[in-house]
Amino acid sequence: MREHVTPPPVRVIAEAGVNHNGRADWAFRLVEVAAQAGADVVKFQTFQADALVTADAPKAAYQQRNTGAGESQQAMLRRLELPAALHRELKAHAEQRGLRFLSTAFDEPSLRLLVDELGLTLLKIPSGELTNAPFLLQHARSGAELIVSTGMATLAEVEQALGVIAFGRIAGAQEQPGPAAFRAAYASPEGQAALRRGVTLLHCTSDYPAAAEAANLRAMDAMAAAFGLPVGYSDHTLGIEVALAAAARGACVLEKHFTLDRALPGPDHAASLEPLELTRLVAGVRTVSAALGDGIKRPQTEELATAAVARKSLVARRAIRAGQVLGPQDVAMMRPGTGMPPMAYWDVLGRTASRDYAAGDLLDE
């Protein structure tokens, strides 16, 4: 029989992202909201705009809808940068409030800040960096636990990214990276073991907001089967229903953007949860996680009393004398279920009664 292991509770990442609009006071308030909602992790985004995008890089369509098309993506992102000193303060504040602090790095200097200065041992790789092999390799060599978002990706691209990470985990500094080396690392037992020790995949639909019809939650099952790794879900749909469905489907991590007010100006507010919604989401996830159980089909303790009432036993259909051979006309199935189970019906037929029974008595032959 296959051993059943109860999965750990769903890890809820409250994604503050850039919804602080570059203001320190809003960033601290977002930490407070995440803590009050009962999330496990509060996550920001760390970047240097000039290292992330070129001066003439366009905004994404959703960014243009929410912030206008009159400025470049670089100009918008400059307003949303958080200084290094504020990162340290936010991390300390989050930990004081019982939250794990997490941020997504989008460029090499930002990654060094998170790992070397803040000492983060958990890193989130965003979907847009999944094909950025040099950046993946830097994440892998950090030694941190990695949560890898897979929006916009095919299974083949996810496998390529995992190959880079496996190489970064097991290869020596003198080994030359490259596609062949990545494939070999992924195929090796050592590489697979390294991935299992510290990589979680997130299914994601990179649209803001994403339609429920585009969520494709069954892709979580496809990734789990293909890679044998824990799989979670980064949700960009409106509301909490799809996120709860992902939790019910077995997501081990659930990430969701939240904001202080959906009407605030900025690229991500419109597709984010407000504080009360975040609280409802976390409460719903905790209920769903508890309801999933351990997967073993057995009566729950609470059912045992019901079974005694709802199930049936073998009873005397009519008065029976000691020494009488029992036939179908003598045996009935009736409640309560505290006597011989009806599965023993055919074993009882043909037996000789050892004592007298009144009609309705439980048989004990």
Image (cartoon, rainbow, N blue to C red):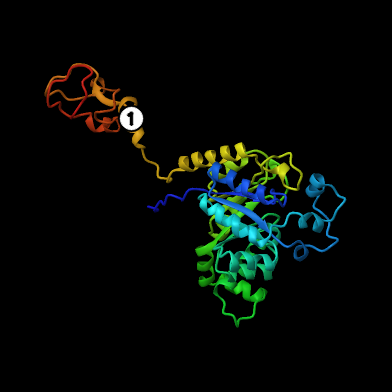
Q: Is mark 1 on a helix, strand or loop?
A: helix
The answer to whether residue 160 of the structure is visible from this angle is no
For the point 57% across and 70% down, which residue is it?
Answer: 187
Q: Could you tell whether 168 is left or right of 212 in the image?
A: left
Which residue extends farthest right? 70
Depth order, front residue of 235/228 = 235
Q: Where is residue 358 in the image (x, y as percent from the top left)?
A: 18, 17
Which residue extends farthest bottom? 174
Relative height, residue 233 to residue 190 (above, below) = above
Using a 10 Å C-alpha cutoff, classify the residue at mark 1 as few (fewer than 14 neighbours), some (14 to 19) or many (20 or more).
some
Depth order, front residue of 292/107 = 107
For the point 67% across and 43% down, which residue is it?
Answer: 259
For the point 21% across and 20% down, which residue is it?
Answer: 361
The residue indicated by pointer 1 is 307
Relative height, residue 328 to residue 233 (above, below) = above
Q: Could you tell whether 5 is left or right of 179 in the image?
A: left
Q: Position of residue 81 (x, y in %)?
A: 72, 57
Relative height, residue 239 to residue 311 (above, below) = below
Q: Could you tell whether 65 is left or right of 31 in the image?
A: right
Q: Where is residue 320 in the image (x, y as percent from the top left)?
A: 17, 19
State which quadrant residue 335 falls in: top left
Depth order, front residue of 152/96 = 96
Label total for image: 1
Identified by mark 1, the residue type is Ala
Depth order, front residue of 204/266 = 266
For the point 50% across and 50% down, which residue is it?
Answer: 98
Q: The C terminus is located in which quarter? A: top left
Q: Position of residue 332 (x, y in %)?
A: 28, 22
The answer to whether residue 75 of the structure is visible from this angle is yes
